[in-house]
Amino acid sequence: MIMKNKILLGVISFFCFNHGFSQTATKVYGDNANAWIMYFGDHKFSSKWGVHIESQFRRNDMFNKPQQLLMRTGVNYHLTDQIFFTVGYCFVETYPYGDFPVKTSFPENRLWQQMQVKSQLKNVEWVSRFRIEERFSRLPVLKLNAYVPGESVYTNRLRLFNRFSLPFKGKTIADRTWYLTMYEEVFINFGKNVALNIFDQNRLYFALGHRIPRIGRLEAGYLLQSIQKSDAVRIERNHTFQIGLTSTIDLLKLKKS
């Protein structure tokens, strides 16, 4: 049943991505060169419970200008070794950048819930994720001839994620293993305050990774982030170099040692 649901999730992701950019209106494209430095931590403190800690420093014009700051945390519940659920909070600060800049920097507070499932298909590791976000964005408004963050605007967003990783040697990604990985994630807005961009964005990622003993996975790669703006006409394409560390250090084992 889980496998069938994951295949259905992948099909929905593919359909949403291709349908989202196939509207008849003429699109205007803008391209940016960005760089993201990221940390992801999922750390167990009991047999079933753990904490999620995440920070992302997103830069525009490679490392020269700010794009976004993202800080995310949450509590994980591990149903099995392959399935866990998370509820949490996220803070995002968005800055003016690129070909379609916002009028001024603004904050966003976000609640989020997700289910993540990990499977092994022969020597391919498959991770799928279903996430829902409740977003409170203080979008820029014009006051006294200057743009400032306005009142919070509430929207919802659905995120569908599928990731595949292939080790160079062996059937699984063990310590000191080098591997190739790719993922696609589709973002869909919903709720009464959503503008014309019901299809919000798509992310397509390719990277080289290495599993570091007792720490986690280090990856470096390329992300194509395609964002549909609120008018459903402007499409922002962010060509992004990424460096990310994903840590799964078990706090319970550290305490016992």
Image (cartoon, rainbow, N blue to C red):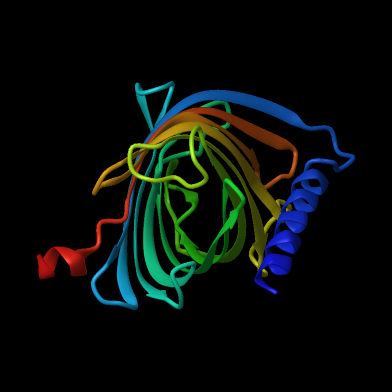
Indicate the quadrant where residue 150 lies.
bottom left
Locate residue 160 relative to residue 78 in the image: left or right.
Answer: right
Q: Residue furthest right?
A: 24
Q: Residue furthest front?
A: 170
Indicate the quadrant where residue 249 lies.
bottom left
From the top left corner, tell me how far across and down residue 91 is, in percent: 36, 57
Quadrant containing the C terminus in the rendered view: bottom left
Locate residue 8 relative to residue 70 in the image: left or right.
Answer: right
Locate residue 7 relative to residue 226 in the image: left or right.
Answer: right
Q: Is residue 33 above or below residue 169?
A: above
**From this viewpoint, is residue 58 visible?**
no
Q: What residue appears at the point 73 percent right and 53 percent down from the top-left corner?
A: 196
**From this viewpoint, is residue 92 visible?**
yes
From the top left corner, tell me how far across and down residue 73 is, in percent: 33, 62
From the top left corner, tell me how far across and down residue 82 is, in percent: 49, 67
Quadrant containing the N terminus in the rendered view: bottom right
Locate residue 49 relative to residue 98 in the image: left or right.
Answer: left
Q: Nearer the viewer, residue 133 or 256?
A: 256
Q: Is residue 22 above or below residue 238?
A: below
Q: Nearer the viewer, residue 128 or 173?
A: 173
From the top left corner, tell me how far across and down residue 178 is, in percent: 42, 33
How many circles with numbers are drawn on the protein? 0
Q: What residue appears at the point 41 percent right and 74 percent down from the top-left corner?
A: 78
Q: Is residue 91 above or below residue 239?
A: below
